[in-house]
Amino acid sequence: MAGLAAFENPQKLIDRAISARREADSAAKVFFKADSFRRIREYERGTGYTIEKLRMVRTFPDTIEERLTDAINNTRNAFDQIIFAACDAIRKPTKDGHFPWACSRTDLDDWRLQNKKTGKETVPREFWDVIRAHQPYPRNDANTEGDTFIRTMAMFANRKHTIGIEVGCNVSETTIGCVHFDRVAAGIIPMPRWDPKRKEIELGRWRGQAYLGGKSEVSFYVAFDSSAPDELTRYAAPDAVGLFAEKAQMVLNDIKDTAKALGVR
């Protein structure tokens, strides 16, 4: 497929990624609005404590992880397809087109855009400047430019298994009211923290008899699990996936505009 029509394939992949991400986000909103969490009280035999908890009582839908995985994979493939399309558009077809993700600007220039030893172009020279502008490498102590988040997402997307996700939780405010202890040997009101393995928050514990009132202001979201790099755990998973797809769209638009400037129609 020659000319600007070559860019239709990566555009389809990006569109599919955006659609899959949207479906995952919609499913998550339905789950978090429903009666998926319940305040319960349990007796802990080993310690003798009665524990007040907020627990997730419904199974997290598999479709959310499935659709986010689809979105990430389609976006990863779109980046590579952009290079194939760029080569086809200017009639320099390649059989081994890959987006030039790099470790640094030097790595990009010396090895990812061309082979330093042979001088062979890996990406057509016509597109070097636009790719450099997107800085497809992470920042580090010796490198003050780069896009660490997008580079990390690209590495994460290259994993060969399903992207792991779990429920994340923010506790913005906790109000403890109407706490009545009667013949209580010990009482503890902890700082509420979400336990992703047990899928619950401990609100308070005591020995004896007590009533724990008040409430905790909590918000739930879809998070990457502990297998994800630290750089990604700062984001809700759908947000991170959305930013990855947005970057692919930006690169596609810029590469396509460069092709147009070269006279491609």
Image: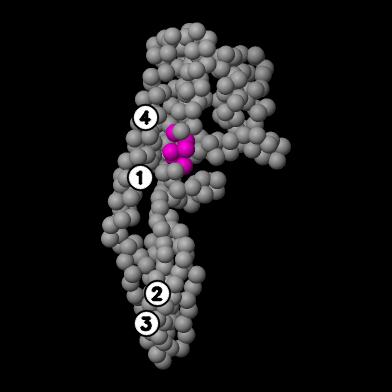
Nearer mark to the viewer, of 2 and 4: 2
Q: In the rendered structure, which disc, 2 or 4, sits on the residue that comes first in sequence?
A: 4
At a point 30% along the width and 53% down the height, the residue shown is: 31
> Tag on residue 15?
4
| Residue density around tag 4, few if under 14, some if 14–19, many if 20 or more, within 10 Å | some
Task: In the rendered view, tell whether residue 160 sits above or below residue 32.
Answer: above
Q: Are marks 1 and 2 in contact (CB under 8 Å)?
A: no
Q: Which mark is residue 252?
A: none
Q: Which mark is residue 25?
A: 1
Q: In the image shown, does 42 or 19 lie closer to the viewer?
A: 19
Label whose residue precedes the other's in the sequence (4 or 1): 4
Task: Give the residues drawn in magenta, as a range.
Answer: 240-245
Q: Amino acid at mark 1?
A: Asp
Q: Position of residue 222 (x, y in %)?
A: 40, 50
Residue 159 magenta: no
Q: Nearer the viewer, residue 196 or 26?
A: 26
Instruction: Find disc 2 in the rendering and name its residue.
Output: 214
- Which three-letter amino acid code belongs to the residue tagged 3? Tyr
Measuring 38% from the left and 27% from the top, which residue is drawn there? 13
Q: Find numbered disc 2 in the image and state the secondary structure of the residue it sits on.
A: loop
- Give how far apart the Cα atoms at labels 1 and 2 are: 30 Å
Q: Tag 4's secondary structure?
A: helix
Identify residue for label 3: 211
Considering the whole magenta stretch, tell me its main secondary structure: helix
Mark 2 and mark 3: span between their CA atoms?
Answer: 10 Å
Select label 2 or label 3 by which is in front.
2
| Mark 4 → mark 1, Cα distance in angstroms | 15 Å
Disc 4 marks a residue whose amino acid type is: Asp
**Of discs 1 and 2, which sits in the foreground?**
2
* Nearer-N-terminus badge (4/3): 4
